[in-house]
Amino acid sequence: MKHAKRLQSLMLGASLLIAGMPSWAVNDSQGGPAVRQLNFHEPVTRIASEIYQLHNLMLAICMVIFLAVFGVMFYSIFKHRKSLGHKPATFHESTAVEIAWTIVPFIIVILMALPATKTVVAMKDTSNADITIKATGMQWKWGYDYLKGEGEGIAFLSNLSTPREQIVDTVKAKGDNYLLEVDNPVVVPVNRKIRIVTTANDVIHSWAIPSFGVKQDAIPGFVRDTWFKAEKIGVYRGSCVELCGKDHAFMPIVVNVVSDDEYKKWVDGKKKAMAAAADDPNKTWTVAELTQRGEKVYAANCVACHQASGKGVPPAFPPLDGAQLVVGPKQPQVEVILNGRKAMPPWKGVLSDTDIAAVSTYIRNSWSNKAQENIVQPADVVAARK
């Protein structure tokens, strides 16, 4: 009786817990995973289609082998069991059987290897690309540089754009593209061969888009490459698929495949925006101007490691609140941001002189920091680069 009452109490508590949990409508992610998806993403490149077909072929071959082997095994167990009067055979070996179980698997492996090798070779052929884009992995975002082709010279950072409150608040409703949305997606034209050159600033990352059939590691100090040719206009999503640190789940990849006309418009708009954002390094800024801009730079690039409170994640990422490096002379701080230190990557090739000056000024005037040299001008950063 006591056990029955205890069980009823537990069931009632579980029911109340479930009733109190938020209910969210779950929809397919545009270009990402679908609800109740059981197979690969819809392929939109030739390579992805071949991978999908290979997957189905290998699955079918394995299923036939499974049914044949276990069918014979279970048939033999059932039909030749001791209860029917069967006795075990006394032979030791059979040359014919040994030849058969050597040749048959060899033929099966060859039949599987031929189409797979053809696809793997095609995956590695990055020649004659229309556009070349460098993807640089960093904790925890992606940097993109358009190296060759239409759009050459365009460069930007791509950060997770899922609102922070959705991540930290478990009862907050999640968007359809939760953790798979960015502020600056990669944009490419449809039916063009795009070469992706991968590298990394800090640890090993991996650039992957399932619908393209693309996965390429980004390794510090090395340059690897892959390619895709999207045959369908749309938005396609992926993420870093190499465990790269505490915010590994927060560096998604989004590629917008657009028409040729839309791509030309995007290139023109991006170049105009970059030209407008190119600041004169000789301009003198006020503390308020640099602090306002620096807060945005810090939120986009520094908050994941050093935290919004400036307390950091010791020992890998030390606190900035009250640090001697921050409240002391400004030059050492600028040099650390430019060149990196320990787990922190160098930012001299990622942030502009003005952005480095802005984030330095923001840090020196935030939290409990009251640095005597409370402002860093872009000219100070230019001087530190020399």
Image: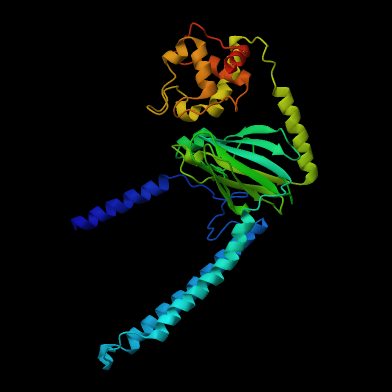
Considering depth in this image, is 26 or 307 the residue closer to the camera?
307
Task: Residue at the far right: name it.
Answer: 261
Q: Quadrant of the N terminus?
A: bottom left
Residue drawn 46% across and 35% down?
168
13 sits to left or right of 253: left
Residue 24: % across, % down: 51, 47
Considering depth in this image, is 122 or 41 the residue closer to the camera?
122
Considering depth in this image, is 136 or 94 the residue closer to the camera?
94
Q: Quadrant of the C terminus?
A: top right
15 sits to left or right of 209: left
Residue drawn 45% across and 29% down?
343
Task: Residue at the far bottom: name it.
Answer: 85
Residue 262: % across, % down: 77, 42
Residue drawn 65% across and 49% down?
227
155 sits to left or right of 368: right
Q: Quadrant of residue 319?
A: top left
Q: In this view of the protein, can residue 232 be seen by the observer?
A: yes
Q: In this view of the protein, can residue 307 be seen by the observer?
A: no
How many numbered marks appear? 0
Residue 82: % across, % down: 26, 89
Task: Residue at the far top: name it.
Answer: 372
Vertical position of residue 290 compared to residue 127: above or below: above
77 sits to left or right of 103: left
Q: Quadrant of residue 282?
A: top right
- The image's colour scheme reads rainbow
Vertical position of residue 333 compared to residue 199: above or below: above
Residue 138: % across, % down: 53, 35
